[in-house]
Amino acid sequence: MTFRSRLNAGSAIWRQWPTAAAIWKKEFEPRKSGVNKGKTAPHYHMLLWIPVWVAQGKEDWLRHWKLKLARNHMADGRNLISTWRFEAGAEVKIEDMGPDVKVVRRQIVVRKGTFEIVEYWKMDGINHLTNAASKVAESFAGVILGPKEAIQSWFAVNWYEVVGSGESRHLAAGMGVEAVKSARGCITTLLNTWLRWRTIRQPNTRA
């Protein structure tokens, strides 16, 4: 994540919550799962203070449903027409379905093993994800969305827009959110973060 990306993400936070305060922390740790398991990769932690937030508007539900529907292989500008799964190492035959069909290949790791997924997306220029999420969100406007779900979808959608990959699977990945409900919990979180930082940064030394 570049400095400009962090700046854009911070701007989005303070537009939403002008009195918010946040601590960002970047860490490099080995991946614990997936095809890149064992490889060192960056990730971010944030401790965020925001005022009491009641999410019940259409825009809040729009973000919520965009995250939900993205996890069901819905995207803007394209439509998923076919998905094939192959065992890792097997020969993968790619079909030519025309100039307006994009092929996306990715690997997944599940309990049964490692597989390669081949998806065929028809590039039709229709905002399937946004249109569907907007239609559903209209019927929920005025209903209070749970605070954890509201914050999780807010960050997932805004982070996705800041990064700008255009791949709905990156939106579907979302991000973890935990609520700190007391001053003691906040202190504990800060202490654990500081101890983890020292563990990562300070090599073991002999007494």
Image (spheres, helix red, strand yellow):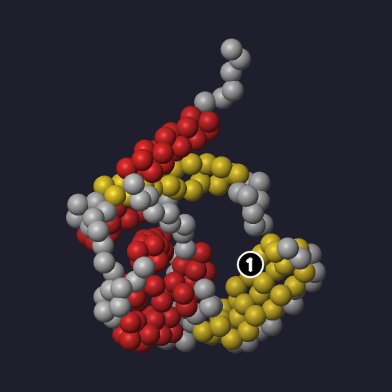
Position of 91 with respect to 120 (left or right) is right
Position of 94 with respect to 164 (left or right) is right
Q: Is residue 131 visible?
A: no
Q: What is the x, y in percent for residue 100?
A: 53, 85
Foreground pick, 55 / 206: 55
* Residue at point 63%, 84% (across, down): 82
Query: What crowding class fits label 1: few (fewer than 14 Cα within 10 Å), some (14-19), or many (20 or more)?
Result: few
Q: What is the x, y in percent for residue 174?
A: 47, 63
Foreground pick, 59 / 166: 59
* Residue 73, quarter of picture: bottom right
* Residue at point 63%, 46% (across, down): 39
* Residue at point 59%, 86% (across, down): 81
* Residue 189, quarter of picture: top left
* Residue at point 25%, 58% (across, down): 52
Quadrant of the rendering where the C terminus is positioned: top right
Find the residue positioned furthest to the right: 90
Find the residue positioned furthest to the top: 207
Q: How many numbered marks appear?
A: 1
Find the residue positioned furthest to the left: 18
Q: Is residue 87 visible?
A: yes
Q: What is the x, y in percent for residue 192?
A: 46, 37
Give the structural element (helix, strand or loop) at label 1: strand
* Residue that carries the numbered disc 1 in the rendered image: 106
Amino acid on which disc 1 is placed: Arg
As displayed, is residue 71 above or below residue 111? below
Q: What is the x, y in percent for residue 104?
A: 60, 73
* Residue 162, quarter of picture: bottom left
